[in-house]
Image (spheres, helix red, strand yellow):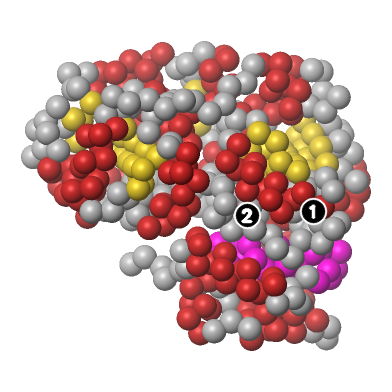
Amino acid sequence: MRPVTATPRALLQILHRLEVGGGVNMRYGGVDCWPVVRNTFTTVSLKGMRRRGGRVGGAAFLRAVYDFIRLVIGGRGADAIILSDFKYRVIHGAKEYLRDASVISYQYEKQGRSSLILTQGLGFPDSAIRYRTLYAMIAICYFVSRFIVNCTPDRRVHRYVGQIFDRLGPDEIRQINASRESCIRNVYFVIVARWLFLWILRRKKPRRCFIVCYYSALGMALCAACRTLGIESADIQHGVGGSNMRSYAKWVSIPPHGFNTLPSIFFCWTHIDKVAIDRWAKTTGGVHQARVTGNLWREYVELTGRDRAAEFYIESLVSGYDYVVVYTASVFGVSSEMGAAILNMPDRYIFVVRAHPDTPESEIEAARSRYASQEGNVLFLSPSACGIDLLMRHADVHVTEWSASVYDALFEGVPSVVISDLGAQYFEDFVAAGYAVSAKSVEDICDAIKTLSGKRIQSAFQLTDESIAEVIVPG
């Protein structure tokens, strides 16, 4: 069952009312609390302790403890620190990457500078990527913050969060999908994590920290630590942005000196995302600013060469059809409307369904069985089968409910059809710009696919190798 949460526009209306009413800005323990609470709404930013790649074993945990000790008491310095996650792991040209984190690390290495990748999960035991995991640090923050929540005689954070929730109606509380307890826990988690990051940053002495993405609990803690030490922090866009994305748009109560739990620079994929940030960041006098960089990983792939084996694989799948429609499914699978649209489209269309990264392989196999009678014009691919950029390169039309793959389609000049209310709101700027259309009914979805077939849109942004280096590595 899908969770009951506010639509993007409805949530921003709730946040707007709270911010206009005042009383949401408070600094405690060196942390600006409102961004933590606001980002906890619907996202519940404290993800807890988890591992990408399987259960946590004794050896993996010992590795995590060793990494943390090395971070806080020794090791070499780093010109840049990059906070990322193994969910961004990809294989390209038989090599392993963490997408943007690997691109940044490569650019620093190319200019004779050093970088350090920190991951929020344990990762994979056989990974060739050089990184240090923050899993042990997360464990420390997790337990220490919970101890403080339950034992501290100072109840200012409890009262602060309580006053915010007292201004919300019962329906609004259900829509934000967060609790008082989760907000309080996240504030204390960020406070503890900031203190530990201060310790690490003083030893590593980076000039800039990159964060993918800032609105995790660790991301906000790193932002706050960077601000304390005068280090530049940069958020690397990894998903949906724009004027209806709660973590990037419409910060009404932003003070003139900004929030220390927000990054100083936002690296944006498109001008649409930059404009949404500029609308509120301009009041901070440059404390917060946005720059259009494009998708760093995509541009790196373009400059270093495509994976020809993967190219041939996709070409073999879609050959013989007039039009290729790529459908990026949500975690809930193929929507009923999209399923019906597939059944109603002519045979000259092939539908390539790319499963959500969190979809179990067993569910993908079950979906393949359900559509087995479709004469071979429906293919189900797991995310690991090939990169989304390769799929879009061979697509004529892209369809999704609300996936950030709309950006991947845009970069390849492919129009998108968003088929949910959520998607229509997240991508209303894209619809207005002509990069996408909104369609809800089965008939409208089919008409939109037919209308857009064979049409191309202007690609949004291009980078050269020199401009990537200029953007990433400060002079």
The residue identified by callout 2 is 249
The residue identified by callout 1 is 283
42 inside magenta stretch: yes
18 lies above or below 303: below
Q: Residues within 10 Å of mark 1 (few under 14, many from 20)?
A: some
Residue 248 lies left or right of residue 92; in this view the side is right
How far apart, in angstroms, are the residues tagged by discs 1 and 2? Answer: 14 Å
Q: Residue at x 24, y 45 (%)?
A: 445
Image quadrant containing the N terminus: bottom left
User: Of residues 445 and 209, which is closer to you in this image?
Assistant: 445
User: Of residues 215 and 410, which is closer to you in this image?
Assistant: 410
Q: Residue at x 67, y 79 (%)?
A: 164
User: Of residues 349 and 153, which is closer to you in this image?
Assistant: 349
Residue 325 locus on image (x, y percent): 27, 33
Instruction: Place residue 88 in its image quadrant.
Output: top right
Residue type at mark 2? Ala
For label 2, the SS is loop
Instruction: Place residue 104 in its image quadrant.
Output: top right
Residue 124 lies left or right of residue 231; in this view the side is left
Residue 234 locus on image (x, y percent): 74, 41
85 inside magenta stretch: no
Which residues lie in the magenta part? 26-46
Image quadrant containing the C terminus: top right
Residue type at mark 1? Thr
Q: Which numbered disc flags the more N-terminal residue, 1 or 2?
A: 2
Q: Can residue 326 be seen by looking at this rendering?
A: yes
